[in-house]
């Protein structure tokens, strides 16, 4: 599983021993720092760290015996020396960036290890897409471990993806060098019901001695939850309240508390540790989904750790949740997650454990960022042409494709409406009474139209429904080929004409996110790789995303990180109501449901 540029402990052990004993000189020594020991939860002042071959050889007082004439010496000057931060569960594609550009964005924030689940690209390009992400990840100067996606489609029968992942695909990927486990098992009803395919994927992972990621997006903590835990998932990041976290750790799972761009689930669950006093070893901090704007303007794992501290968590405990706890979970505690001999030399220098300024970042023994600026290259993969041409609409869409016909003779109808919940992944199943004009159901007030445009097989198919919560007004439409998890195209709007313009525009540019108002393009973020990612720098993508956010606000949107909410409206494994290419999906029942509840007159 070692990256090409990282030698194994066995290969360098003689050198590490010789450096620790003072017989050979270290490559780098950090002096006069406070050793943040996450193994023992201690702060140990006046310590040095000696590094050789990218690994830690010695950590303790007075490391002068490790210094030779060629040794680089960094004076920590009384600052804290803490382990590089580990993101236990995340999706690189959510940043709209390739692995190389995502790495470039997060390294200055102190993230030195990421556990990524590329199931977004798996839905578009299948196993090949996973391999491309995996291969570019291994080129980077930090540790990117890949979890083989488990659910493409996430809910078979309720959506159609570009490709499907099979148990044979999972078994094959378990032999790849950077694969550490199975990505989040989103199809929790299948596990609960003993589905042969899902259990075979879990078995293939466990037979390989690797970790099974969980995703139990249900408030039901009764027999269904216990059946899911019995099925083998080792962690879960879908908890939203204290009782969720407690239930998971009691059943031997790790509770992953997330702070992403739109998911704020740490504050509501960390009280299990800070107030209830549960053992923090089985609690882990992750981000899940962070878009480029968050990475550039706010941070990454450093942001999440700061937030946990602000929520009352002891700084050393919060750091354990973002370092050693993660390493232990994936069986990598001898590689990452702490400052100790033999481990990869992933180290942050910071002058304040609460504010957590990331002043110097060292990854694998190399200074990779200084003062918030990256100091190394992040190599790119040569992405094939067909990975850049994945938006296949089959025809030029027109306003008529977004019409919703009413029952004959109806003047008004009661319809089901997807209700957006700010800062949370779940939606609400709402109802609204809407008028019928010229045989078409018309959105009004807080209710907008939503459409799912099929883009993998050029079928020209469009599913139409209604959504509430964005606050849009006037004539507008926003379209995105980031549409978790099937990644067709989601279009939300108040104007069918603008909805057609937005959809066709993304067909022209090969994917991305676009907003039209009054027939004029207001903002565009091009995402040419699988319709999900750009290989531009994070700052460039973030600037375009910021312009998109401004355009959404100008159109009346008042939600925090509304783009993230938009992109999840097709995620048919999180309750309560979603849209797919099959139609409107009731996720509480896992079935396609009728849009119209009742004809009123």
Image (spheres, helix red, strand yellow):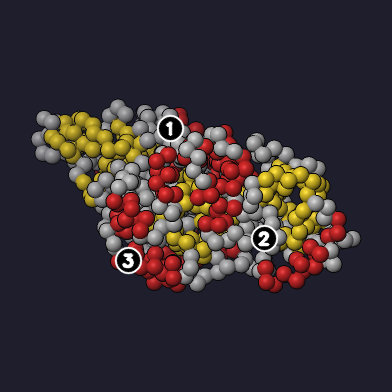
Q: Which residue is mark 2?
A: 343
Q: Residue at x 50, y 33 (%)?
A: 550
| Label 2 – label 1 distance at C-alpha | 43 Å
Closer to the camera: disc 2 or disc 3? 2
Quarter of the image holding residue 9?
bottom right
Quarter of the image holding residue 14?
bottom right
> Please, is residue 134 above or below residue 255 in the view?
below
**Does residue 316 appear to the left or right of 263 in the view shown?**
right
Q: Secondary structure at mark 1?
A: loop
- Label located before the other in sequence (2 or 1): 2
- In the rendered image, which quarter contains the C terminus? top left
Q: Which residue is mark 1?
A: 559
The residue carrying pointer 2 sits among few (fewer than 14), some (14 to 19) or many (20 or more) residues within 10 Å by Cα, namely many
Residue 262: % across, % down: 46, 39
**Does residue 164 appear to the left or right of 95 in the view shown?**
left
- In the rendered image, which quarter contains the N terminus? bottom right
Residue 333: % across, % down: 60, 59
Q: Are marks 1 and 3 in contact (CB under 8 Å)?
A: no
- In front here: 287 or 11? 11
Q: Which residue is mark 3?
A: 197
Residue 103: % across, % down: 60, 53
| Label 2 – label 3 distance at C-alpha | 37 Å
The residue carrying pointer 3 sits among few (fewer than 14), some (14 to 19) or many (20 or more) residues within 10 Å by Cα, namely some
Closer to the camera: disc 2 or disc 1? 2
Q: Is residue 507 visible?
A: no
> Please, is residue 6 above or below residue 43 in the view?
below
Closer to the camera: disc 1 or disc 3? 3
Quarter of the image holding residue 122?
bottom left
- In front here: 47 or 440? 47
């Amino acid at each position: 599983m070692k990256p090409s540029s990282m030698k194994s402990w066995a290969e360098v052990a003689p050198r590490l021993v010789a450096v620790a004993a003072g017989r050979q000189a270290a490559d780098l020594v950090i002096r006069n720092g406070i050793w943040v020991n996450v193994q023992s939860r201690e702060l140990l002042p006046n310590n040095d760290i000696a590094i050789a071959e990218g690994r830690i050889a010695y950590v303790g007082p007075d490391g002068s015996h490790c210094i030779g004439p060629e040794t680089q010496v960094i004076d920590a000057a009384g600052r804290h020396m803490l382990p590089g931060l580990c993101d236990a569960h995340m999706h690189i594609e959510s940043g709209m960036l390739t692995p190389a550009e995502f790495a470039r964005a997060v390294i200055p924030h102190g993230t030195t290890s990421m556990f990524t689940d590329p199931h977004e690209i798996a839905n578009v390009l299948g196993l090949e897409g996973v391999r491309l992400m995996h291969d570019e990840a291994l080129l980077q100067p930090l540790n990117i471990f890949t979890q083989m996606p488990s659910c493409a489609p996430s809910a078979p029968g309720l959506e159609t993806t570009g490709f499907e992942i099979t148990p044979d695909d999972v078994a094959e990927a378990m032999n790849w060098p950077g694969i550490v486990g199975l990505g989040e098992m989103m199809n929790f009803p299948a596990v609960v019901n003993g589905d042969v395919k899902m259990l075979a994927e879990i078995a293939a992972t466990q037979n390989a001695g690797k970790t099974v990621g969980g995703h139990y997006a249900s408030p039901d903590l009764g027999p269904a939850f216990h059946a899911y835990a019995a099925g083998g998932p080792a962690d879960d990041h879908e908890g939203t309240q204290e009782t969720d976290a407690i239930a998971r750790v009691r059943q031997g799972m790790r509770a992953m508390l997330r702070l992403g761009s739109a998911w704020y689930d740490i504050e509501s669950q960390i009280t299990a540790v800070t107030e209830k006093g549960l053992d923090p070893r089985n609690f882990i901090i992750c981000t899940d989904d962070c878009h480029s704007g968050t990475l550039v303007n706010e941070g990454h794992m450093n942001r999440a750790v700061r937030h946990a501290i602000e929520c009352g968590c002891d700084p050393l405990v919060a750091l354990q949740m973002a370092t050693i706890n993660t390493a232990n979970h994936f069986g990598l505690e001898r590689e990452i997650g702490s400052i100790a001999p033999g481990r990869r030399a992933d180290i942050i220098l910071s002058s304040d454990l609460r504010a957590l300024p990331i002043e110097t970042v060292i990854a694998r023994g190399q200074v990779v960022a200084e003062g918030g600026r990256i100091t190394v290259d992040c190599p790119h993969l040569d992405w094939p042409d067909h990975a850049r041409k994945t938006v296949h609409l089959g025809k030029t869409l027109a306003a008529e494709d977004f019409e919703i016909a009413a029952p004959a003779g109806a003047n008004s109808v009661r319809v089901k409406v997807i209700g957006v919940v700010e800062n949370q992944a779940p939606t609400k199943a709402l109802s609204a009474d809407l008028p019928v004009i010229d045989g078409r159901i018309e959105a009004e007030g807080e209710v907008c139209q939503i459409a799912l445009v099929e883009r993998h097989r050029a079928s020209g198919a469009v599913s139409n429904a209604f959504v509430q919560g964005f606050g849009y007004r006037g004539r507008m439409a926003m379209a995105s080929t980031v549409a978790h998890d099937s990644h067709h195209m989601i279009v939300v709007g108040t104007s069918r004409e603008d909805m057609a313009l937005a959809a066709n525009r993304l067909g022209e540019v090969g994917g991305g996110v676009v907003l039209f108002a009054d027939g004029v393009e207001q903002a565009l973020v091009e995402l040419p790789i699988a319709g999900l990612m750009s290989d531009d720098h994070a700052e460039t993508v973030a600037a375009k995303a910021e312009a998109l956010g401004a355009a959404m606000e100008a159109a009346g949107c008042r939600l925090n990180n509304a783009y993230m909410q938009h992109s999840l409206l097709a995620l048919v494994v999180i309750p309560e109501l979603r849209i797919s290419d099959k139609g409107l999906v009731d996720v509480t029942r896992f079935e396609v449901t009728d849009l119209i509840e009742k004809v009123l007159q």
